[in-house]
Image (tube, rainbow, N blue to C red):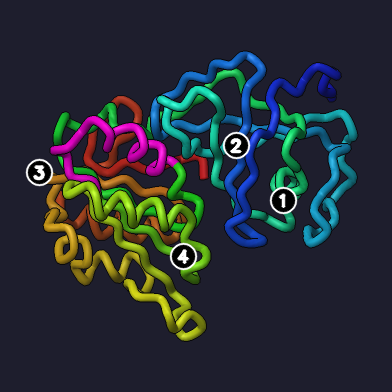
Amino acid sequence: MSTAPASTYNATVVGRESINPQLMILRVRPDSGEFNFTPGQFGVLGLKGKEPRVPEADPDAKAAEPEKLIRRAYSISSTNLERSHVEFYLTLVTSGELTPRLFALQHGARIFLGPKASGLFTLDRVAPGKPVVLVATGTGLAPYISMLRTMLISDATRKFVVLHGSRYSWDLGYRGELESLARIRPNFTYIPSITRAEQDPHFNGQVGRLPKLIEDGVIERLSGVRLDPAECDVFLCGNPDMISAVKAFLAARGFTPDHGKQSGTVHVEEYW
């Protein structure tokens, strides 16, 4: 089994923002100074097995090979207009191999960043100007942040709608930024939702699981965008159960999957 050479690490942690103990924003700067991508794509992060894990993580299921590189794909949340760093929105999986090590990183730490971004979960396959509804749970929000940070600067006509669900309001990463965007951009609607309202009584927003909210018409009611394949494309990223439920609902409305060479009106991030 191959191990990672000493020169494997090719990027530096230049920012680390804790949203809560299980969520963080990680910014890394590639040594090359260049990392080209299309908003919606993902990059690969990696650390060697010898790197420490955060104390709250479970022990490794089996001992990690010290020099072997553990890699995972994560959606990029930064705009591709930003050249100083690449940003990722991460959730701690206590039983995982990589995120317990990523969460132990501090400013200045070294890390592996895959040489190029990948993925077809982009706006390139949507007709110019057509409204998009961007639905996510948890860190599935990341690719939409990249899209909004890049597109809203120059596109004042296309309607963007973000429906983001989490358990509690303190799990709604980027909430302040999205609320600010919604105030200043008339073509953007932000709809946050939580499922544990009884433990978060001060939250002033939608309550319930995303498939039920969508079925109840929350998107049409708050954004004016009709869930009709002739009028919008829908993007889905996050919990697989949410994705399958919303896909079924949309299929009944005439939406078709966008996959490979098949062009459609429902776009799903496949690597989750």
Q: Distance between the residues labelled 1 and 3?
A: 41 Å
> Which element type, helix, strand or loop, lies under badge 1?
loop
Q: Give the range drawn in magenta.
A: 143-160
Tell me the residue that label 4 is attached to.
166
Tell me the residue that label 1 is attached to.
96
Query: In the rendered structure, which amino acid carries the disc numbered 4?
Result: Ser
Task: Select label 3 or label 4 by which is in front.
Answer: 4
Are there few (<14), some (14-19), or many (20+) residues within 10 Å of tag 4?
A: many
The disc, 2 or 1, on the residue closer to the chain's N-terminal end is: 2
The disc, 3 or 4, on the residue closer to the chain's N-terminal end is: 4
- Residue 239, how many percent across, how many down? 47, 56
Q: In which quarter of the image is residue 110?
A: top right
Q: Would you say 99 lies left or right of 84 here?
A: right
Residue 135 visible in the snapshot: yes
Q: Would you say 226 lies left or right of 209 here?
A: left
Tell me the residue that label 2 is attached to.
27
Tell me the residue that label 3 is attached to.
230
Residue 255 visible in the snapshot: no
